[in-house]
Amino acid sequence: MNAERSLKSTNFVFFGGSSGIGRAAAAELARRGASILIVGRGREAGEAAVASLKTAGAASADFLAGDLSTVAEVATVAESVRAWRPALHGIMHTAMAAFNGKQLTADGLEFAFALQYFARAALNRLLITQLAASGDGRIVHIAGNVPGLFMPDLDDLQFEHRKWTFFKSVLGTHLLGFLHIQEAAQRWQGQPVTISASCVGSTKTKAMSDPAMPLVMRLMGAFGARPEISAQNAVRLLTLDSACDANSAVLRSPNRYSPERLAQSSAQAAKLWDITTRIAAQNRLMLPGP
């Protein structure tokens, strides 16, 4: 498990990497000499992260400003990432936000669904060609070890009929991510791309301390792990000599590297894939198949 691939002349993108777990993971890859693109909303935080990555030893480090809560911006960010490098050796998703009540994006999507599920799924599909072009592209979702009882109703993903709560909203996005990972791995069989989820517990991050975050979440964050600790399995997934054992898998414990193959409903996974395709098309974004 300790053997690592060489990161010389490799390219990685960290969505939400301006701070927290994403920045901690990016720093580890910078120390190994990778080229890194940080994607985030705040330019000041993003440029500070880039400066620290260059100091850490990154072959290059760049910042791309992008608000991943809208479909149009997801498309724009994907286009900019493709222009940054033609081949990607890994991407990592950590973007999240705090909010006190149900919010809708400009596209009419529930905010957590848009940012913490849809953006990830759409970006993965929009960048699959670049990931495959590297010969060993890896996708890592930072997630929580959420019990299945929080699985959303796929016919009511925008809480039009169900009562919205913060925990139903946020925890449900992790389970939707698991469905996406399982379906993507099945559809991308034969391509040199692996996709996995790395679960973390409470972590001391900027998002967790946001005043808009529910009090219980802020307290959990205050006593949580350092981002560097929570990032360890994600770093392993991106740097190990092979991540094949973790394809279509979830690492449920942040304290050990123990991939568990996902076994979600294949019917639900396929249905969510089609729903995602339809939502994108309704907002003039064509996602590549299959």
Image (tube, grey):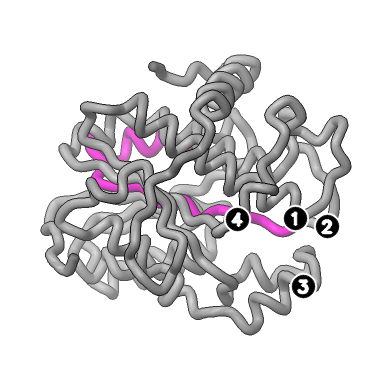
Of the residues shown, which amino acid type is indicated by label 2? Asn
**CA separation, marks 2 and 3?**
12 Å
Image quadrant containing the C terminus: top left
- Type of amino acid under label 4: Val
Side (left or right) of 106 relative to 191: right
Q: Earlier in the sequence, mark 3 or mark 4?
A: 4
Labelled pair 1, 4 in contact (Cβ < 8 Å): no
Q: Circle 1 sits in a helix, a strand or a loop, which is it?
A: helix
Q: Residue at x 40, y 17 (%)?
A: 289
Query: Where is mark 4, residue-wise?
Result: 146
Quick check: can you spot residue 47?
no
SS at circle 4: loop
Residue at point 70%, 39% (across, down): 152
* Residue 205 located within the stretch drawn in magenta: no
Residue receiving disc 3:
216
Image point 24% across, 55% down: which residue? 35
Instruction: Give the alpha-carbon distance from disc 3 to disc 1, as whole Å.
Output: 11 Å
In the rendering, at what x and y percent does residue 11 appear? 25, 49
Q: Nearer the viewer, mark 1 or mark 2?
A: 1
> Do labels 3 and 4 touch, CB within 8 Å?
no
Task: State the residue position of label 2.
Answer: 100
In the image, the segment drawn in magenta is 76-98
Q: Which mark is residue 73?
A: none
Is residue 97 highlighted in magenta?
yes
Q: Quadrant of residue 241?
A: bottom left
Q: Secondary structure at mark 2?
A: loop
Mark with earlier residue (2, 3): 2
Q: Position of residue 93 (x, y in %)?
A: 46, 50
Residue sitting at x 41%, y 74%: 255
Give coordinates of residue 136: x percent, y percent: 19, 42
